[in-house]
Structures are given as C-alpha cells and as structure tokens.
Image (tube, grey):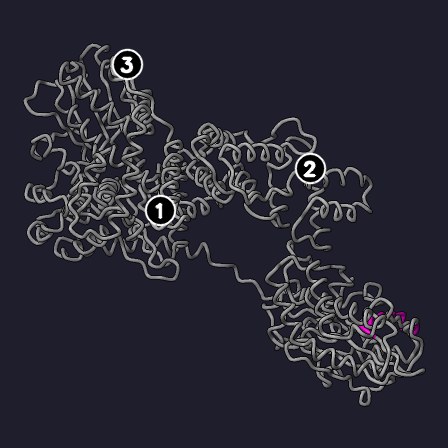
C-alpha cells in the first residue's frame, strides 16, 4: 500500500475536511488497481466507536468491495494472536476499593481531611491514578519530587498519593482499564520490534493527547506498512511558529502542540507530514486566517508581518455568522431557528458545544417544531424515569418519609406499573385530597390507614381502597435507617423495594421498571453495583444514596431511531470525526469553551511537568484543536451570550483573537468581514426576538360578578362577614363557585396552625381551672401547651419556638385570668358556644362560634376571643371586623341556645402575641340594634341582583393576599381600577 520510507510515515488532513470521508476515499485511491483481498488485510484503528460506525457506513454506501478491518483504540488485543493480558477490573470495583483505602486512612488519621470529603478524595485519586498509568508514571516518581517547601499540605498529599501506590501493588493481577491498555501497547511494541507486521496498519483520528496512545502512534508510524493520519493538521503554519512550540509549559494550550510533540518524538519536521488525499478545505483562506489568529503567544508578532499578506478574507468569511445574544435563552432560540431552517432545506446541521445546559435549551426550543435532535450525549440516565425512580427509592433510606416524598413516588409513572395503573392513580388522587384536608406531615401505616378510612366513607368499594392504602403504608413507610450497613445489604434492599413498588399491590412482575432503553441501562448500573458491592464495605444511607446518584448520572440513554437525521448535537469529541453542511459553535465564552482547568488538589503545574504528568492546559489545547477544525466547516455559526446569570461574560480567547486580528486588517477587508458576520447574526437574533414577542392581550378588568340569586350564599359564618365587607369576590368564589383552596401537601408550622393550637391550649386550660381552681398558674398552662404541641407539631424547631413565645405571655394571661374569674365563670367554650341566627325575611342564616362565654351575673355574660396576632382596633371592629359585635348582638337575641338570651357586659379580644393586650369591642358606640340593622342592610344588598361581588373591595393593606386573587387575576388590575359588573346566568 505504501512505498518504502526511511522516515516514519505520518499524514495529515486539513481542518474543515470531513475526516472519515477523506480517510475512506483516500484508502480507495491508494488501493485502486490492487487485488480486492489487499483491502481486507488493512487494519484501521480509530479513536471512537462513532467514527468506526461512520467509516463502515461510508464503505457500505460505496461500490461493493472487501472492507478493511476497523477497530477502536480500546480493542487493540486483536492486533496480536499471542499477546495475553488479564481482563481489566471493573471501574466501579476500583472506585469502591479506593474509597475503602481512603476511609481506612481517615479513620487512622482523622486530621488529614474531613470525613465528608471521602468520595471527592477517592474520585480525585482515581483520576490521578488513571493519568499516572496512562502516562507510565510510577507513584515513586511523584513521591520523590524535590519540593523545597516541605509544607504540611505536601506531606498530607503524599500520604494520599501513597494510597495510589498501594492500590497499584494490590491490583497487578487485575489491572484497571488504563493500566491494561498500557500493558497491551507495551506488549505490541515489543512484538513489533522483533517481528514487525507486513500488512498495512493505520491509526487515524487521534491527536495523541494521552501517553499510551502517543507511544502506539510512534510505533505504528515506524512499521514497514504503518501510517498515522492526523486530524485537523495545520498545513498553513509557518516553520518559525512550529518551532516556537518547543516549550511545553508555554505551548500546551496550542491546537497543534500534540502534533509537534509527536513529530519531535519521531524526529520529523513539519514538512514531513504529507497530505493524505487530494481533498481541499472548504475555505482555504479562512484556514489561513484562523491559523494566524491561533499562533502561539510568543510569536503573535507574526500578525504584523503575515497579516497583510492574507488574501480573500471576505470570501473566506462569507459563510461565517457571529451571533452575540444578550442571554443564553436568546442564543438557544437563534440556534434552534437556524437548525429548523436547515432541517426544512434538507441541510445537515450540527451544534457543537461542551455546554450541556445550552444543548438542552436548544432541544427544548426545537420541540415547538416537533424536531428531536440526534444528541450524541443522549439523555442523562439519572433524569430518565427509571433513574429518578431509583433515586426516589434510595431517598426513602436517608430521611423520614414526608407526604411530599410519598406522593412523588405514588405519582411516578413506574410505580404500580405492572397492572391496574389507572386505579392506582385514582386512589392516589383520593389519598392526596384527604391528606391535604386532614394533614399528614410524616406518613406512617397507621396514619395512612386513618386518612384512607375517612376518604373511603363515600366510595362504592371502600374495602378495595383501604386495601390499596394498606399496601402503600406497608411498602413505602418506615425505611429511614440511621445505621451503617454493608453495600451488599443496601443494594439488595434497594432493588427489592424498587421492584416491590413497581410491581404494585397485585402485580406479578416488575412492570415497566427495567423495560425500554432507560430501564435496561438502569438495570445494568444496578447489577454492576450489586456485582461489585462486596468491595464497598459499610456506609450510611446518605452515602449509599449519593453513590447511586453518581453512578446513574454517569449513564446516558439514546434512541438512535427517534431523532431527526439531519439535526445533530455533538460534544467536542464527537465533532472531531464528523462532518456537516452547517456547523454551529455554541457557548463560545471563556470558562465554557474552553472550560477552565479544574483545580488539582495534589500537584501544581511544575510538579506535574517534572513527574511526567499532563499539564492542566492539555484540555485547553484539545479544545483549541476542536475549534480550529470546526470553524473550517463549509458554513459556520459562532454563538455566545453576552450575559449569563446576570453577569457579564468574556468571549472565548480564540474568538477574541480572531476579532482582534480582523479589526487590525481593515485594508484586507477584515474589519468589514467581521461587521458582516455580526450583521448576519443580528438578523437571526431579530427574528428570534420577533418569535418571542408576546401577542398583546387586553389586561383583565377588576371583576364584580353578579350571579343569580339562587347561586348567592344564603348562609355565612360570623367570621366571613369581615371577608364579605373587605373582599366580596372571595365569598362569591367560595360559596357561589364552591371552590376551596387546597391545603399544602406537607403541612407547615404557619400562623393559622399556631392559632388553632393556641386556642386548643386555652380551651383545655380554662376547663382544667374550672374543675380545679388550684391549677390557675403558669406552670400548668405551659404543661398543657407542651402536651398539645408535642402531639400536634412534629417540627422540633417550630415547637420550641412556639412554646418560647407562649411562655412570655403566660404570667400576663394568668394574672388577667384571675381578674376574669373574679368577675365571672366560663359557661360555654368553643363547640358549646355556637350561635345560629335566622333572618327569615331575608332567607339567610348566620352561624358563629365564640371562643369563650363567661357568665357574670344571672342575666349577663362576657364574650372573649383569642388572637395570636394583633387584635383589631375599636375603629376596625366598627367598620370591618364585626365578629364580637355580631356575637354580642346574637347573645342578646338568645341565638346561643346553650347560653340563652343575656345582656353582654363586655366583648374582648385577648391578644396573645409578642405584646399581649386586651381590646374591647365598642359596645357603647355600636349597640346590638345598630349592628343588626347594618348587618341586615349588608346581607340585603348582596342578595340583590344589582350588587356585584367586587374583588379586593376594601383590603386591609396592599400587601394582603387572598385565596382567590389568582382567579380574580389580581395584578393585571389594582385597587385604583373601577370594578366592572358582570351578570352571570
């Protein structure tokens, strides 16, 4: 295939050329006229499975011929029949073993690091170990580094690094993947030195960024029929710039540095790299411009000397668009619109970005046109239905079950998925509605049974519902575990519980849990964890939950048949070996592309260089190479957002260089070309803004509905009179529309709950003192409060706070209670203090409950109402809050049957807030006759067809919100708008 050569054989393919296609066509050209069997003897090694598939697809689309043997870098053992290397240990096993080693060290020396950093330290050591094995660096090389500053940090770091050395010693018989790859490459090189293969072996598509791959590339280039084909080789780079890459500490971030390193190892010069085939880059002048823009920092003065000689800059950039959006949303929408047009025109288009958030936003924007892009990263497994389900199940072990977590699981599509899923959903809704009404902060089997019994009273088949509820309680409750257990036990319990929940009450299998692509992938993850659980040791429930979450988040789910064939989203790795008519480089901001190097907790740059490890800038260099290849495509979009999270962003260093170079070449048309790039981008942004422009809709008016008389309320409680005065619309929504606000899923320790419980405390205290006057003291009051709050408030912090607040007013309350006892005796509390007033001439009934009624004489009483907030003032009672005034009038009428007709000496609000106070109702200014007359006028007006129920008629304050404000569309109008009556039928 190749002519004999005295130097190693290295070829290159320029940026912008479709690498797999050029490689396949080049093979065909070189084998033209030779026997068909010769093609079958060629070994082609590529760096990814995606590229291997693409190569096979290209050959399948061509004429019939025998195909070369295509393999990926991870399958090198097939290159030798005699090379035997032990199978690699599972990566999970290595991770678990490292966790155990680090945990043992922290147990012995707890001052080294906090226990909470266990998993981060183990993962960091695993990454360091991978790198050391891939680069052939022994642990001793790191340990023996000459560090003049023998600080405590370095001594601690060496302690952890020694764990890596220990692990390598323990894993000789079962090397991990990186170590095994190194052993295979070393073995192949040793065999080839003795007996080099005579058939063609081509390694294509790799940049040699890892030491093991670099060794293999060097060995293959030296074989009699071996060759290396480099992707995105810059043939336009001058020799002076090439030689300036010699200092790796300064040049690691250059896109061509890895090629320079390979050439130096092979003792080759840049001109020794030949073009693989006669393919021409789509825009040669653009390649020259980008090559100059990315020159190494020490030789950027070449801009001044080489820049004026650049030709055809406008022509090279006529198919380049620069989109500088204000926000990531604008950027995503503009990209989606361009991808949609490409799909409509039959043009293949690819978004290339390392920003997964941007790719998800673009996918979401494409969904409006029913376009599903082919995302190379797939969907994250932990966000798939099985992934979320397994994480929810693991969460049952980590914390006490609350109602929100219970309903989240019950509503999950995989729960009870084996059979009768519809009935399960209906029962879940019934349970939720009753739980919201009754309150169920922390569900238990008994608590669920109690709620279910109440909900089943009106069902046709109550037994079926209560049996289902019993299954829920027995299956999902009481799994919180605070003990450390072996990983084997955790996995077994997790799998058993997950399958039981998916099976359901009467199912015979695991339902949909392990089905479809996501379920099968999740099962593989859990089986892998189960197979290696023996190496995990003991751990807490939270540690196990974190471990499962991390394993699931590392997985992905892809459906190759569903996506659009011409709309793709690629990561930078996949983009190296793909081609498309339109390439969009998204998220081109500093910190995103390139990504900022992650901090190394072990070694700084100089120490890494001295030990022979990779520098942090290596990834920046790889990203730079990806950029240089992608921007050379036939049509290119470059996009970025100017702001992100309310902060200004910085353009990517490569975009900055390109813009600066173009602005410095006005005579060559550079500045004009840049302005045209921006104009094209602005046109698309304008279309994106037009697409997002909301259709003007007239704002809602302030409602004042006038329902028919039959639909108007003919019975209210005393406390609702205040609402009828202040917010009539809320009364309309509650009684005419019969809408009720749903309580929160999980009750919270809010003001209404505190008020209800304080009322219960006071009622019980008054009863006890009535039976035994010696109990009239603060100690007994606090004892009752503690008893009731302990039973009803499952939140320790709120319970303690409420008890503390109450303790501040107990002395005051007891002192005032002594005075009340001298003046009267309680005769009616809460339920017994019920009053019903019929207004037959209006066809209306008013009901009310007094907190407490005391008899002060044979014919007189006092009425009291407890307030945990600020009691209403006398003026407020006269106009709005007429509760006590109406109750006093009802008492004098004899509407409280348990009390009879009595005159009222006083009606008092007892404020139990932070500033305890008693506020008396203005009975002298608002006598019963006047109160009843005004009440009758109020009721009569709202039983008139001409009276509307105006929303927020007289709110107490602008900040006050109502249960029905959203229904009234409050916010589109305010209190200054006139109400608009609307007759309803």
Q: Which residue is mark 2?
A: 422
Image coords of residue 545 (percent x, y): 50, 42
Q: Earlier in the sequence, mark 1 or mark 2?
A: 1
Image coords of residue 648 (percent x, y): 33, 61
Instruction: Tell whether position 813 is magenta.
Output: no
**Bounds of the magenta span?**
839-852
* Label 1: element kind: loop
Q: Which residue is mark 1?
A: 109
Q: Which mark is residue 65?
A: 3
Q: Residue furthest bottom?
A: 924
Image coords of residue 102 (percent x, y): 36, 41
Question: Residue sitting at 23 percent across and 34 percent down?
Answer: 210
* 91 up-or-down from 980: above or below: above
Residue 324 visible in rendering: yes
Q: Earlier in the sequence, mark 1 or mark 3?
A: 3
* Label 3: element kind: loop
* Residue nearest the viewer, comparing 276 with 838: 838
* Residue nearest the viewer, comparing 51 with 611: 611
């Amino acid at each position: 295939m190749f002519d004999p050569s005295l130097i190693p054989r290295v070829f290159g393919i320029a940026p912008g050329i479709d690498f797999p296609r050029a490689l396949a066509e080049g093979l065909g050209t070189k084998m033209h006229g030779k026997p068909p069997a010769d093609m079958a003897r060629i070994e082609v090694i590529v760096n990814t499975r995606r590229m291997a598939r693409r190569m096979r697809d290209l050959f399948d689309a061509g004429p019939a011929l025998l195909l070369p043997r295509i393999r990926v870098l991870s399958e090198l053992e097939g290159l030798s029949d005699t090379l035997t290397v032990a199978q690699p240990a599972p990566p999970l096993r290595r991770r678990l073993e490292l966790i155990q080693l680090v945990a043992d060290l922290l147990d012995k020396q707890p001052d080294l690091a906090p226990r909470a950093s266990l998993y981060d330290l183990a993962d960091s050591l695993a990454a360091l170990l991978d790198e050391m094995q891939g680069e052939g660096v022994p642990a001793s090389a790191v340990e023996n580094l000459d560090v003049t500053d023998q600080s405590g940090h370095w001594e601690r770091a060496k302690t952890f690094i020694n764990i890596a050395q220990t692990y390598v010693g323990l894993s000789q018989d079962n090397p991990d993947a990186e170590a095994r790859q190194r052993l295979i490459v070393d073995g192949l090189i040793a065999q080839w030195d003795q007996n080099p293969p005579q058939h063609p072996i081509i390694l294509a598509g790799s940049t040699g960024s890892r030491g093991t791959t670099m060794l293999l590339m060097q060995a293959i280039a030296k074989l009699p029929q071996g060759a290396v084909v480099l992707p995105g080789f810059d043939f336009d780079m001058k020799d002076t710039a090439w030689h300036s890459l010699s200092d790796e500490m300064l040049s690691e971030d250059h896109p061509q540095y890895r090629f320079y390193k390979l050439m130096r190892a092979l003792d080759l010069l840049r001109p020794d790299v030949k073009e693989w085939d006669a393919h021409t880059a789509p825009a040669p002048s653009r390649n020259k411009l980008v090559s100059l823009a990315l020159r190494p920092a020490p030789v950027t003065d070449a801009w001044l000397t080489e820049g004026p000689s650049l030709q055809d800059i406008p022509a090279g950039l006529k198919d380049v668009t620069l989109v500088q959006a204000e926000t990531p949303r604008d950027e995503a929408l503009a990209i989606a619109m361009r991808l949609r047009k490409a799909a409509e025109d039959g043009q293949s288009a690819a978004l290339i970005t390392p920003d997964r958030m941007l790719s998800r936003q673009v996918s979401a924007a494409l969904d409006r046109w029913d376009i599903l892009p082919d995302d190379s990263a797939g969907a994250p497994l932990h966000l798939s239905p099985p992934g979320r389900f397994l994480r929810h199940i693991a969460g049952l072990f980590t914390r006490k079950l609350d109602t929100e977590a219970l309903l989240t699981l019950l509503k999950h599509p995989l729960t009870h998925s084996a059979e009768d899923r519809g009935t399960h959903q209906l029962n879940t809704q019934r349970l939720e509605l009753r739980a919201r009404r009754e309150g169920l902060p922390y569900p238990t089997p008994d608590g669920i049974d109690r709620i279910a019994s109440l909900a089943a009273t009106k069902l046709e088949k109550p037994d079926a519902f209560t049996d289902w509820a019993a299954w829920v309680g027995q299956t999902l409750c009481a799994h919180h575990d605070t003990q450390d257990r072996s990983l084997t036990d955790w996995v077994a319990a997790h799998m058993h519980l997950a399958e039981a929940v998916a099976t359901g009450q009467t199912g015979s299998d695991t339902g949909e849990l392990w089905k479809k692509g996501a379920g099968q992938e999740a099962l593989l993850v859990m089986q892998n964890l189960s197979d290696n659980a023996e190496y995990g040791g003991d751990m807490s429930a939270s540690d196990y939950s974190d471990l499962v979450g991390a394993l699931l988040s590392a997985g992905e789910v892809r459906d190759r048949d569903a996506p659009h064939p011409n709309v793709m989203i690629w990561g930078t790795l996949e983009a190296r070996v793909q081609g498309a008519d339109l390439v969009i480089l998204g998220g081109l901001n500093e910190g995103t592309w390139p990504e900022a190097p992650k901090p190394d907790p072990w070694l700084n740059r100089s120490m890494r260089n001295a030990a022979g490890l990779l520098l942090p800038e290596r990834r920046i260099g790889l990203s730079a190479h990806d950029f240089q290849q992608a921007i050379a495509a036939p049509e290119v979009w470059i996009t970025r957002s100017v702001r992100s999270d309310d902060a200004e962003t910085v353009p990517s260093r490569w975009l900055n260089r390109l813009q600066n170079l173009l602005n410095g070449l006005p005579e060559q048309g550079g500045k004009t070309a840049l302005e045209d790039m921006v104009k094209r981008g602005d046109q698309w942004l304008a279309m994106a803004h037009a697409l997002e422009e909301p259709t003007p809709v007239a704002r809602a008016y302030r409602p004042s509905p006038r329902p028919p008389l039959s639909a108007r309320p003919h019975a209210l409680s005393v406390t609702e009179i205040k609402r009828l005065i202040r917010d009539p619309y809320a009364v309309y929504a509650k009684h005419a529309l019969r809408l009720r606000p749903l309580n929160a899923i999980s009750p919270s320790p809010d003001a209404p709950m505190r008020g209800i419980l304080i009322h219960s405390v006071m009622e019980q205290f008054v009863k006890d003192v009535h039976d035994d006057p010696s109990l009239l003291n603060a100690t007994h009051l606090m004892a009752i409060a503690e008893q009731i709050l302990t039973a009803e408030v499952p939140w320790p912090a709120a319970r303690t706070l409420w008890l503390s607040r109450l303790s501040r007013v107990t002395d005051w309350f007891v002192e005032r209670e002594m005075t009340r006892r001298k003046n009267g005796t309680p005769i009616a509390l809460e339920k017994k203090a019920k009053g019903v007033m019929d207004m037959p001439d209006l066809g209306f009934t008013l009901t009310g409950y007094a907190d407490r009624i005391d008899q002060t004489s044979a014919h007189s009483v006092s009425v009291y109402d407890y307030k945990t907030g600020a009691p209403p003032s006398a003026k407020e009672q006269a106009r709005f809050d007429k509760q006590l005034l109406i109750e006093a009038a009802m008492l004098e009428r004899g509407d409280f049957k348990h009390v009879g007709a009595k005159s009222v000496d006083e009606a008092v609000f007892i404020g139990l807030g932070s500033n305890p106070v008693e506020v008396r109702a203005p009975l002298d200014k608002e006598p019963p006759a006047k109160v009843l007359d005004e009440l009758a006028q109020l009721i009569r007006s709202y039983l008139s067809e001409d009276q509307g129920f105006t929303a927020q008629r007289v709110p107490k304050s602008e900040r006050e919100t109502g249960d029905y404000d959203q229904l009234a569309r409050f916010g589109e109008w305010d209190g200054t708008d006139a109400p608009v009556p609307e007759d309803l039928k």
